[in-house]
Image (cartoon, coloured by chain):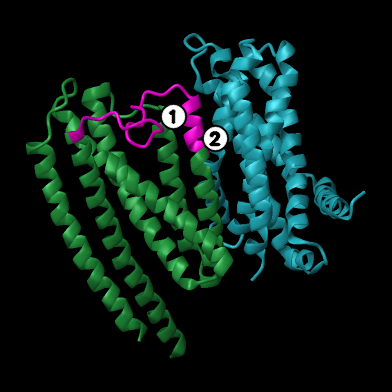
Chain colours: A cyan, B green
Amino acid sequence: MPEALRLVLAIAAKDIRAELRSRTALLSAVVFAALVLVIFNFARDPTAVAAVDLAPSVLWVTFALAAMVALNRAFTVERENGALDGLLLAPVPRGAVFLGKLVANLAFVGTVEAIALPLFVLFFNVDLGHALPGLLGVTVLATIGFVAVGTLFSAMAVRTRFAELMLPVLLLPFMVPPLIGAVQVTARLLADRPLSEMMGWLRLLALYDVVFVTLCTMAFASVVDE
Amino acid sequence: MSATAARAYVRAGTAITLLAFLALAGVYVLALKFTPIELRQGLAQKIFYLHVPAAWNALLAFSVVGLCGGLYLWLNDRRLDRLAESSAEVGVALGVVMLTTGPIWARPIWGTWWTWDARLTLTLFLFFLFVGYLALRAALHDPGERARFSAVVGVLGLLLVPFIHLSVYLFRTLHPQPIVLKPSAPSLPPEMLRTLLISGLAFLVLYIGLVTIRYGLALAEEEKERRLDAT
């Protein structure tokens, strides 16, 4: 295994291990996502709006809010006992630290999404059918993009006075392109539309991932180094 | 030393801003008296000569923030950070002009103040992004940290713009398609194009004037902090 990849996985494994030992953040994020879904169910008039019309946006707003809660946690844990300083003192390139945190955050957000998706199917009575593989694909594509930006911003937000408030304010505009794309693709998937109608959005999502993962990896050094 | 430089910037900026206001008054006269009235939209179309130049310059201001951010991360020059800060504030002000004149026009023409059309939504989010940029600056105390963090947000914001533009073309949109900044020739009668371009120029001068004033203020603030630290 190449050295850089080993470092990335080591940092990700550290975060995942720490999370699995307490499980409080993961549990709260899952409960939070479930609550958002429940509240959405009461926010619509079932006689006027069919569940399936609202489903794509409900799903993605839930994912976005849950990701926000999860990302807030990413660097607040590193702040305690000067853990981040220790991590930065390790002979590891900054890019690897960032990618490690990114992988850990993706695991975290992915877990929340994996639990929220069946709940969504249950609460909204959506027939996923053969849309499931496509839905998983678009979820991966969209999540990578905004979690990458979120990981970087979370490293900045912890240094400010209102970290919990600063992260959503900075991150939400960046979530807009992936979220719009994801909602559009999800709506077409649920309506059984042909792949050609989604290709434009899928390309946009993939391009977003490539651009922002690269850029955030490069910018990370400017955020953590004095 | 720095205090005199700050004063010079503010003075020059004020002069340029006054010039821009004069030019804007000229633009109003030009747009109302010497530009033909659009056949279908009537007088409501006149707001186009404010809305579009304000939007152009707001986008220019946000691009300057991004470019200065990128250059700052490379060259580490305090002046670039000051320029980015000034440009972001003026950009937000121009964004307010864009976001208020738009609905005033949309009400008679589209029959609604606001619609969740792709371009409107995304420019609104771009505006929020720069409000967030200013909020981030306000929430950070250390000048070096503030400069680095906001430079990163500025660069990322600049890269968000193409994605916004791509989404606009993918999303079916109600907003009039670009009529000047597009691959083919502008599809606007020459008199209207002339007024629009003159107005764009007036707004550009206004932008430069306001940024110069704000740059001087940033200098003065730094000077104040340095004197406070010295005592």
Residue positioned most to the left: B33
Looking at the rendered structure, the kind of residue marked 2 is: Pro
Horizontal side of A7 relative to A113 (left or right) equals right
Is residue A166 inside the magenta stretch? no
Prevailing SS of the magenta stretch: loop
| Magenta extent | B163-190
Up/down of A63 relative to B128, above or below: above
Name the residue that disc number 2 marks: A177
Residue A36 seen in the figure: no
Is residue B180 inside the magenta stretch? yes
Looking at the rendered structure, the kind of residue marked 1 is: Ala
Front-most of A149 and B70?
A: B70
Residue B25 seen in the figure: yes
Front-most of A163 and B181?
A: B181
Q: Where is residue A222 in the image (x, y as percent from the top left)?
A: 63, 63
Front-most of A173 and B18?
A: B18
Residue B118: assigned label: 1
Q: Distance between the residues labelled 1 and 2?
A: 10 Å
Say which residue appears at 33% left-offset and 32% top-offset: B185
Q: Where is residue A141 in the image (x, y as percent from the top left)?
A: 68, 32
Residue B32: assigned label: none
Residue positioned most to the bottom: B231
Up/down of B82 relative to A128, above or below: below
Q: Do the residues labelled 1 and 2 touch (CB within 8 Å)?
A: no
